[in-house]
Image (tube, coloured by chain):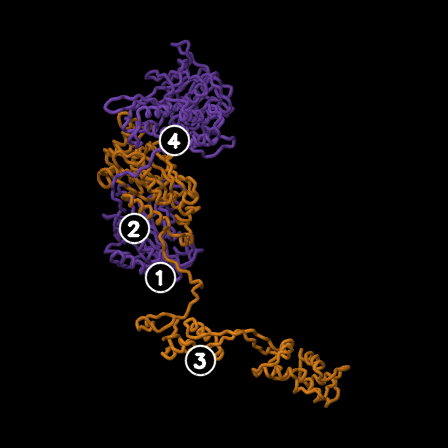
Chain colours: A purple, B orange
Amino acid sequence: MPVVDVQPDELRRLTGHEDKSDEEFKDDLFALGLEFEGVTDDGAFQLEFGPDRLDRLSVEGVARSLRYQYGDARGVSVPNTNDPDWTFVVDDDVPDERPYVTGAVVRGVDLDDAALDSLIQLQEKLHATMGRKRAKGAIGIHDLTMLKGDVLSENASGNSITYTGIEPDGDTFVALDSNDELTPAEVLEQHDTGRKYADLVSEYDRYPAIYDEIGLFSFPPVINGRRTEVSTDSRDLLVELTGTDQWTIDRMCNIICYALAARGATIEEVEVQYETGTVAKPDFEVETKHVSHDRIETVLGVELEMDEVIDLFERSGLDANAELAEETVYEVSIPPYRVDVLHPLDLVDDVGRAYGFNELEPRYPDVGTVGQRHERSRLEDAVRTSLVGLGFEDLLNFHMISEEENYERMDVEVGSDVPASEASGSSPEQRSGGVLGGGEPASITEPYSEDYTMLRTWVLPSLTMVLENNTHRAYPQDLAEIGHVAHRDDDENTRVAEARHVAAVLARHDATYEDAKARLAALCRDFDAELETPVTEHPSFIDGRTAAVVIDGEEVGVVGELHPKVIVDHDLELPVAAFEFDLSALA
Amino acid sequence: MRLPESQVAVLNAASATDERTIAQLAEATDQKPETVTGAVFDLRDEGLVSVTETAEESVELTDEGVEYADEGLPEVRLYRAALDVGDGDAVPMGQVIGASSLGGPQVDIALSNFARKGYGHIDSGELAPDADADPDADEEAAALAALDAGESVDADVLDQLESRKLVVRHERTIRAVTLTDEGVTALMEGVEAAETVDRLTPEMLTSGEWEDVEFTEYNVEADAPEARGGKKHILRQTADRVKDVLTGMGFAEMEGPHADADFWINDCLFMPQDHPARTHWDRFALDVPPMEDIPEDLIDNVRDAHLNGVGDDGDGYHSPWSEDFARAIALRGHTTSLSMRYLSGHEVGELEPPQRYFSVEKVYRNDTLDPTHLLEFYQIEGWVMAEDLSVRDLMGTFEEFYSHFGITDIQFKPHYNPYTEPSFELFGRHPETGELIEIGNSGMFREEVLRPLGVECDVMAWGLALERLLMLMYGFDDIRDVHGTLCDLDLLRETEVLK
């Protein structure tokens, strides 16, 4: 969730509510959905909010929303724009991967320290959110007085800059926070910011570059040139944005222009000259969507007058015209800084917020349905109840595990769940003769840590780890878990075969095979399941004291005494009897 | 009448006319005095005897007193030895002491009392016995002998003996027992002895012997050895409670895969593919081939929603949409993937409103592992499908649900989710601390979610971490103590069960 730092004094100035206390602001902001998270070292509120209203990523946007909330502003407001003086020429050499550009000229800004900080923060926050860490859109803001436009031959009065692409070492410039003339490729290697964003362009044949008559002054989306750096002395700015999507960078540009206009600056259009034609930017077109009165009433669950609805729209910074036909439909105008309105229902949400959702009276929906547990969940619960009745402590472990814990420390080999004689056979479901837990791992591509690299193929490794971590606790330790297991199986639609296993360990000074089998038999009796225990081998267990668990004629697991090497490897000093089998066998 | 053997004996030995002391009864019944005392009190409680208590002083010879009673007082022995050795004349002290066979501290005792009691003089190391003295008339010796024989003595001489530490005096209560009229009646009607036993045995039960026995009393306040049974995991107990509440509210449980295609996990939910939560560092992608079998019409519908939106006025995301990404398989980051499968009609057939479904199952998030965050945790997920649902229905449903966990005063903070609109973060009043805490995330599924799945009515949904509910209810500081292989068995064993 985005967090924006907002100076309360700036809020007072920009809303015109000089007398509001910090506490009053906090309450008003909470009502807008901006949650107070704390205060920065220099006294700014840290406000967290959902990533929909990205127009609130700066104090200017937050103040605008408050002014609507207070009723100081109503309806859609669009800044006046002056006619273009500057042209952005997009030439043939522009990288195919990043073909779009937009921007504006902003005149008469009054950048004190607070305003400059806010502008820089807004730029960074937009990069992080809509700009997808500059991959989708990147903003460059320049001191206009430091730029010398190319004179366009057709139009002697205009200036132009050129968005193009150059060879990685095709030119040099001095980047921000640097004193050295570097090529773009050198910036990616030597400059801190360059290294940070190198991945964005390093695969490009040509690097994005913006020129004025003097030369290269911006290397989007990586870094600006030092020549055009903005300071508190800057009065006129040139804003340029490049990216992979025109709509996205246009909206980012609008949010910046609205923020600067809120501080009294004048927005001047620029012309963007693509090969396909010339367009004027910024794009302040007001879009409309339609929503019926009926839908608003249904969603909110209250009856509303038409005037009331229109008032609520206007208090949300929208305009609405009622079109009276068979049913009342509003044509709603949406200001160009809004990036979150994809569907008319988003406008209903705005009405609800303005109305105050907490004003609504909750009611229990009057529809009848039948509740029930899932069959599998009921079975699992019944088996767990039986295990607890047999004296087992019910455990709950992670499904993610390391290969070392799942296989190596249990002395089990990967892929050993299918016996050699059946490896090429027909049914991978049949584990007959294979090693329980020996399935191929469903591995995690980028694990959180080396402790969690795959889904466990069986449960006993988890229980043995619990024993290992609790040697200081009283014995006997009789532990059981009914848990999720999985192994890779390309025949499954999800490529992963998932199951639930029932597993138990008895760690006590006199634990034997008989202890495990007795409890297993008791469990099977509870479920009227016929248990047979033919001799088998399993690398985690002692030969001659290991049996296959055969329930109702199907081999579904293993029971026996854990092998001393497994016990010792887990730092245990007493025998452990154990069993594990597939839960579905008791269904 | 049946009474324990000890009581029967006491009853028989007691008299209605003569008081009998405990000591007398003990002797008469051949039982220990403490046994008799216990029997007497029980009989008194039954009204069969009456007991009078008198305080009595008893005198007991000390070890030293016993010795002197046997061998004579040291001063007497000294006197007799002096007479023997000197035949009435003064004799050197050493000679007398040697003849008297006195030793150690007895010598000093003998010498000091010798003069005090007028047995003679001691002068310049010589001992001169007084021939007129009569050791046989020594009243201390006589008193000692009398006490040794169980007789009483004069109080003055007793004080002297006490000052010489030859006797100790005890205050004690003498209980005297007489039969009451009821006791006499009981005896006349016949009293039989009942047996007392330590353990009730199967034989006693089958033979009926239990009817005739008295059970010895245990110290019922003493600690018993620790007993331990199995117990359902506390998180399972919490999940059970949630399932009980939800089934009671008409919700049916969903079930489905933990490893699933991103299509079901995210694309159906109208999560743009370049959403930060879908980047590689937030999800657990699995190293397996992509999912092949996804209904083609569904893919087309979902792609169209992402690119172009839903409805006449709908807009899509300005983000690329790749079918390859949609087919890639990962661990589900929420159980909403199950909701999508059910709503699509591909899990249990086409659903007609109204419906209520829920799940309390595991989800996986590549988040930071810390005391309140796990890489895998249980998500409570629920949804209601009906015609014309309003946010008031959503609010009423949650108020009902949370009230079962003592969480009241539910607040709805407007919120943003890509898949719901309107959306609310749910806050509630903590049952213990009273603070306002976040308890879930909710909303009405967007049309961009529902229409591609073929759902034409409204669906409201919510989600909440089960661990969060558990921590709220139990106040655990570190969820890792409970969930996972680092769990503390003692904590699990000692945790109070959920009522």
Looking at numbered disc 3 in the image, what kind of residue is underneath it? Ser
On the same chain, marks 1 and 2? The answer is yes
Looking at numbered disc 2 in the image, what kind of residue is underneath it? Glu
Q: Is A337 placed left or right of B268 in the picture?
A: right
The quarter of the picture where residue A94 lies is top left
Q: Which residue is the site of mark 1?
A: A512
Q: Position of residue A21 (x, y in %)?
A: 48, 29
Badge 3 sits on which subunit?
Answer: B
Q: CA distance from mark 1 to mark 3?
A: 66 Å
Viewer-side label of 1, 2: 2
On the same chain, marks 4 and 1? The answer is yes
Q: Which residue is the site of mark 2?
A: A380
Viewer-side label of 4, 1: 4
Say which mark, if any, is on residue A51: 4
Viewer-side label of 4, 3: 3
Q: Are marks 2 and 3 in contact (CB under 8 Å)?
A: no
Looking at numbered disc 1 in the image, what kind of residue is underneath it? Thr
Q: Position of residue B18 (x, y in %)?
A: 47, 80
Q: Please report whichever mark, 2 or 4, sits nearer to the chain's N-terminal start.
A: 4
Q: Which residue is the site of mark 3?
A: B15
Q: Is A239 placed left or right of A377 in the picture?
A: right
Secondary element at image label 2: helix
Secondary element at image label 1: loop
Q: Residue at x 42, y 80 (%)?
A: B12
